[in-house]
Amino acid sequence: IGENLQVWSEVGSTNDLLKDAASLTSGDVVLAECQTAGRGRRGQTWVSPFGAHLYFSLFWQLDSRHAALQGLSLVTGVAVAKAINDWLGDAVRLKWPNDLYHNGRKLGGILVEMVGQANGPVNIIIGVGLNVAMPPESASRIDQPWVDLQQIYGQQVDRTELANKVISALHEALALFADKGLAAFVDDWNRLDCFWGQAVVLKNEKSQQVGICRGIEGDGALLLEAGGQVTRIYGGELSMRSH
Ligand code: BTN
């Protein structure tokens, strides 16, 4: 595994920096103190003020495309959540597919992108953003309920130590994923699922579906139970069902 860690003061987006980089080794990481064009999923902006949070991207090469992007992003969520929970206390949960949550508020997100040739090895960029201590002037720019580590744990959190723990956990998890696949992470993912056993709504462009959340399966599908039937879901946005 590549041990190469680059720290930048300011970048557009750490994901884009890795996309444009030449000769990377699996495990290489770029970290930045701030991003001027931080990106979230579905074209959203990721608010990335200087010196406040954690923003990094990790490069990983897979043998083939079918080794699955979805799996990688679920594995990343498990690794990051466990690293924090083991260190600071069991408070971080996952919202499918890979948001980091605490009591209905978003703590962090993961943006997995593929740089890709059609055949042969596939280059993957795994971007992780974690709120550590939100500056008041940034808070107003975020359009969803958010939380940071400082609020959750009621203490200051050292970002260098956090980066260390999260990145090493990710290295270990990805090595295990390369060896055993997503199956090795399903139990952990389901234990961390913030919606497990709850009534949820799954929305995508065309439709919406309600059901009880039953966690994930070995291929990364989310299981939704309704009327005694289980449906496998591969995309869309999940939210709590309001009664
Ligand atoms: C999400 O929408 O939940 C995903 C957010 C991902 C943010 C991280 S911060 C580091 C990396 N660089 C980016 O531009 N985005 C990801």
Image: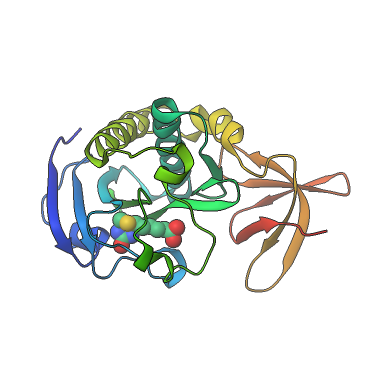
Ligand 1 image-quadrant field: bottom left
- Inspect this view and state whether residue 120 appears: no
* Of the pair 219 and 91, the residue shown nearer to us: 91
In which quarter of the view is residue 192 placed? top right
119 relative position to 233: left or right:
left
Q: State the image coordinates of residue 61 (x, y, percent, origin top left).
A: 27, 44
* Of the pair 158 and 136, the residue shown nearer to us: 136
Q: Residue at x 12, y 47 (%)?
A: 6
- Quarter of the N terminus within the rendering: top left
In which quarter of the view is residue 46 placed? bottom left
- Quarter of the C terminus within the rendering: bottom right
Q: State the image coordinates of residue 68 (x, y, percent, origin top left).
A: 44, 47
Q: State the image coordinates of residue 23 (x, y, percent, origin top left).
A: 11, 50
* Of the pair 88 and 235, the residue shown nearer to us: 88
Q: Residue at x 33, y 35 (%)?
A: 170
Q: Residue at x 51, y 30 (%)?
A: 90
* Of the pair 74 and 179, the residue shown nearer to us: 74
- Inspect this view and state whether residue 214 appears: yes
Vertical arrangement, residue 204 with respect to residue 170, above or below: below
88 relative position to 243: left or right:
left
Vertical arrangement, residue 112 with respect to residue 151, above or below: below
